[in-house]
Image (cartoon, rainbow, N blue to C red):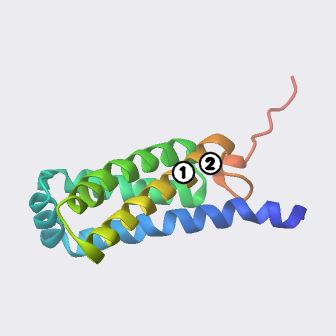
């Protein structure tokens, strides 16, 4: 059981960070399309560089466990805000399966935020840059 606990946090960080890192790179390669989608949803396209920065830097920081609690807090907030902007509000004007899909996507964002808040509460765990301790020589 101890071995499982030792690897649960790093595996959780990999799984939580993967979506943000991949999404950040996809936004770079599909910059114009993403910017257009943001504007269509009422979000200024000029915010796209900030979105990419949050996803890439936050995702990588979470992955390696560097400042993981700060990164997780920011990514939790990002998940909630983007869920409201892109999934919850549009679902009110839809019917049937489309609306159900948007509600599920919103709930996915809420669930991701919950996982991020677990990292905020309990830290990055083992095998992380944040768990390394620097020994201070005795004087």
Mark 1: few/some/many CA within 10 Å (<14, 14-19, 20+): some
In the displayed structure image, the side of residue 48 where residue 115 appears, left or right? right
Where is 83 relative to 8, above or below? Answer: above
* Viewer-proximal residue among 1 and 127: 1
* Viewer-proximal residue among 84 and 125: 84
In the displayed structure image, the side of residue 110 where residue 41 appears, left or right? left
* Tag 2 secondary structure: helix
Residue at which label 2 appears:
118
* Viewer-proximal residue among 29 and 4: 4
Q: Which image quarter is the N terminus in?
A: bottom right
Q: Outermost residue, front direction? A: 96
Checking the image for residue 114, the label placed there is 1
* CB within 8 Å, label 2 to label 1: yes
Residue 66's spot in the image, x, y percent? 57, 50
* Viewer-proximal residue among 133 and 26: 26
Residue at 73 percent of width and 48 percent of height: 132
Where is 106 relative to 121, above or below? Answer: below
Residue 133's spot in the image, x, y percent? 75, 43
* Residue 74, quarter of the rendered image: top left
Checking the image for residue 37, the label placed there is none
* Tag 1 secondary structure: helix
């Amino acid at each position: 059981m101890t071995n499982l606990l030792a690897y649960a946090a790093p595996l959780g960080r990999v799984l939580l960070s993967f979506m943000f890192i991949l999404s950040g790179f996809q936004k770079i390669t599909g910059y114009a399309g993403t910017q257009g989608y943001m504007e269509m949803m009422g979000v200024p396209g000029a915010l796209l560089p900030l979105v990419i920065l949050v996803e890439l830097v936050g995702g990588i920081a979470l992955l390696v466990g560097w400042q993981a609690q700060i990164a997780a807090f920011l990514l939790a907030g990002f998940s909630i805000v983007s869920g409201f902007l892109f999934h919850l509000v549009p679902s009110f004007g839809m019917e049937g399966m489309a609306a159900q899909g948007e509600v599920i996507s919103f709930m996915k964002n809420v669930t991701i935020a919950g996982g991020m808040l677990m990292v905020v509460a309990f830290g990055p765990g083992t095998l992380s840059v944040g768990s390394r301790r620097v020994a201070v020589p005795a004087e």
